[in-house]
Amino acid sequence: RGSSRTCHKNKCVIEDLSQRISVSIAPTLLRTLPSTQSNLSTMYTKVLAFGMVASAAAAGPSAGNTMRLRGGFAGGFAKLNDTPSVLERAATNNQVKVETKAGGDVKVEASFIATAANQIRSALKASTSVQGVDVVVDLDDSGAANVNAKMNNLVDGLKLTLDTQVASGSAMNDFSSPKISAEYSQGNMGAAATKSGNNVDLSATYGVNDEISAGVSTNYDSAGGSLGDISLAAAYRSGANAVSAVINGLKGDNIGLTASHTVNSQLDVAGTFSTSDSKFSVGAGYKIDGDSLVRINANSDGRVNVGYDRTISDSTKLNAGMELDANDSSSRKIGVSMTCTV
């Protein structure tokens, strides 16, 4: 909306959302960033994730903990296009992540990733909440940072998000074309808009009932005044079964289908197929016990991915991943990561 809202105590300023947004983060969070931070460059991630969708349970959670498409909105059009986690690729990098509380409401995560035999890449993530604004800052070892600020219930049912990048060595007050997202839901209907530069992504969702949700999505070029292709999506879930479809463009030559099924409390299976390139993927996840699970998936490109997750204790988690290429027997990736909370 065109009006402005100012929180003097924490210096949060949000003015004229279609043109400019600036955020001054609370001092406790600013200490986590180098003093020589950054020019903001546009950071744009498509809200639309065209592909197959299912809200089935993944290997990790049991069937009772999976998302149920209620009220139609279900997090927006992107949620209608979520891929079942049994089909997601397990990471094959070697990584150690340490999570802790820096003090007050500030949470800090430090990650150390081995990129080569003698190289280690580090990253720092800090998050806090100030006057109803959730702020997350991701800082890598080059000094660059991603900044995400989210305000829930700006008005009833409205969520506003600012996402931008801070380049190393530039002034903190130099904001340049951040990505701005707004999501609004009321009852069984929802709408979302994301603006980055001249491009605006638009979507709407509707809950027919507790089992069926549908959505429509497109994009608009404000510079050229042109409307992009329209995409349609629908998802159905009943008990242990879920089916979804997405039509990318109204020509009908690019359709994605997904089906998933929870066999029992330990086993989940899923598969996707795309008519545009006749590619498919299948996968399964098996919960070994309450603390560990394994999942495997393969696609039509000949890639096989295996993942293993184990909760060692309340504060320690272990993840392992392996990827094989059926077209190249010498191509093999293996990685192990550990997350510790202190």
Image (tube, rainbow, N blue to C red):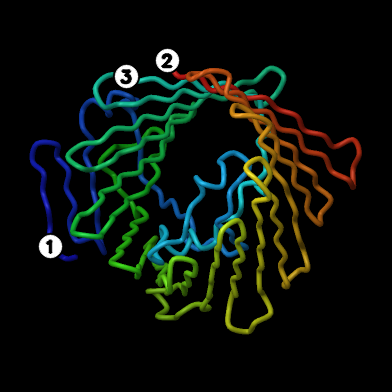
Residue 108: quadrant of the picture: top left
Mark 2 residue crowding within 10 angstroms, few (<14) / some (14–19) / many (20+): few
Residue 148: x and y, percent? 35, 43
Residue 162: x and y, percent? 32, 50
- Please give the label number shown on residue 342: 2
Residue 265: x and y, percent? 62, 42
Considering every residue shown, the one lying at the far bottom of the view is 251
Residue 176: x and y, percent? 33, 51
Q: CA distance from mark 1 to mark 2?
A: 43 Å
Q: Earlier in the sequence, mark 1 or mark 2?
A: 1
Labelled pair 1, 3 in contact (Cβ < 8 Å): no
Question: Would residue 112 be visible to someone looking at this image?
Answer: no
Please report the residue visible at 75 percent of the width from the left and 41 percent of the height from the top. 305
Q: For the residue marked with disc 2, what is the amino acid? A: Val
Q: For the residue marked with disc 3, what is the amino acid? A: Ala
- Please give the label number shown on residue 3: 1
**Residue 181 versus residue 256: which sits nearer the camera?**
256
Which one is closest to the eye, mark 1 or mark 2? 2
Q: Label 3: which residue?
A: 102
Please report the residue visible at 24 percent of the width from the left and 57 percent of the height from the top. 20
